[in-house]
Amino acid sequence: MHHLLRIFITLFFVPHFFISAYGYEIMDYKIWEYQPYDGKILKMLFSPDGGILYTYGSGGGGVSIKALNFQSGEFLENIHNAILYDISNDGQYLLIGESDSAILWSVAYQSPVRTFSDSYSLHSARLSIDNRRVYTSGAVYLEGHIDSSAVIKTWDAETSELLNTNIRPSAMVKLGEIYEEVTPRSCGGIDLSPDGNFLYASYGFMYEYYPGVWVGMGYGELTYLDDWQTALIVEGGDSSFSPDKKHWATEDKILDLETQTWVHSLEGLTELFNYSPNGKYILGKSSISYWGTIWDADTGQPIVVMPATFGYSTAGAWSPDGSKVVIGGWDGTITVWDVIEFVESSVGKEAEAYGK
């Protein structure tokens, strides 16, 4: 579709469709809107008390992390020109990335506390639930090897000691209608389950699509953290574990972690953001509008769509009490929505309207 035609449909047709189909003035639930970046919003994390929203976005030729007072809507400061990965459970530290290192950053003192670096290409990092471990992922070049290898490293968060280096082995991945053995060359995003039992990682590999023609592809792997054995291999994509530790969402599906069976598909989801704090809803991006959308986690049906001023939503997060949602856009805009009343009154009715 021509780019200008897509913009026209997004700005004029889609808003009318959703508002008229739902029978609600969705915009009435928008609290405020800011534009802290001139590039897209890449990630957003709340402090545990919900008072501060940490944003990570691009603009001005680089990326930066900023802090927003969520009560007043005032941006406090530009924290650091780095990548935002995670926040500790007590809100005292941010886990950020800079060059080839992950850094534990003190919120109170605005300075690095510990650095986790071991001469490799860093792609992602996460803190364990108890804040005692740091997991980093990326790619390394092993001696005698031409190609890189995917790696996940485990660190002691208090001492910066490297505890484990896990070079991921080859895996059987479904390519079309057959399974083939591939070797992961890099490890991208990683995610941890709330009980610390599982780690999810997305991997990249090179595949000879035609003789002499190699293309980059990817897959995702759910791993048991106690022995690093594979639990499940999926096509890849974003990840979010439910707060009750029973379910896991990836791509557009929900998995029962105990039975290892898929229980729901999320209708129309193209990008997954995260579960709500009560585990009843899932926030992501819709294939119809590319706007922030909320799905009913029990049925997989979409129930609320939050229009973006200039289209594409790129990031989203729930406030810790679950009453509000923040949506980031490709134009650097952040919108805040008071969703709890709207969501609870829309379950059932909205999904039916969306389907039509």
Image (tube, rainbow, N blue to C red):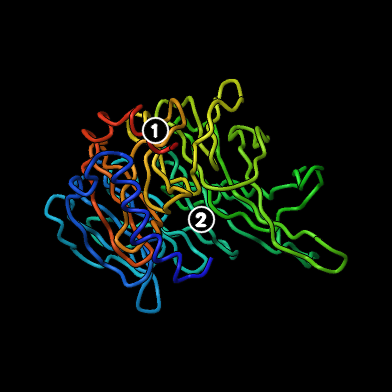
**For the residue marked with disc 1, what is the amino acid?**
Ala
- Rounded to the nearest whole Å, what is the CA distance between mark 1 and mark 2? 35 Å
Q: Label 1 crowding class (10 Å Cα cut-off): few <14, some 14-19, many 20+? A: many
Residue situated in front as seen by the camera: 239 or 111: 239
Q: Residue furthest right?
A: 211
- At x 81%, y 47%, the residue is 181
Q: Residue furthest bottom?
A: 61
Q: Which residue is mark 1?
A: 351
Q: Which residue is mark 2?
A: 124
x and y percentages locating residue 269 in the rendered image: 48, 44
x and y percentages locating residue 65 in the rendered image: 32, 63
- At x 29%, y 31%, the residue is 346
Q: Is residue 94 visible?
A: no
N-terminal label among 1 and 2: 2
**For the residue marked with disc 2, what is the amino acid?**
Ser
Residue situated in front as seen by the camera: 224 or 173: 173
Which mark is on residue 236?
A: none
Instruction: Please tell me whether mark 2 sits on a helix, a strand or a loop.
Output: strand
x and y percentages locating residue 197 in the rendered image: 53, 31
x and y percentages locating residue 1 in the rendered image: 54, 65
The answer to whether 249 appears left or right of 166 in the picture is left
Marks 1 and 2: which is nearer the front?
1
Which quadrant, please, contains the C terminus? Answer: top left
Tell me if residue 108 comes above or below residue 196 in the rendering: below
Q: Are marks 1 and 2 in contact (CB under 8 Å)?
A: no
- At x 77%, y 47%, the residue is 176
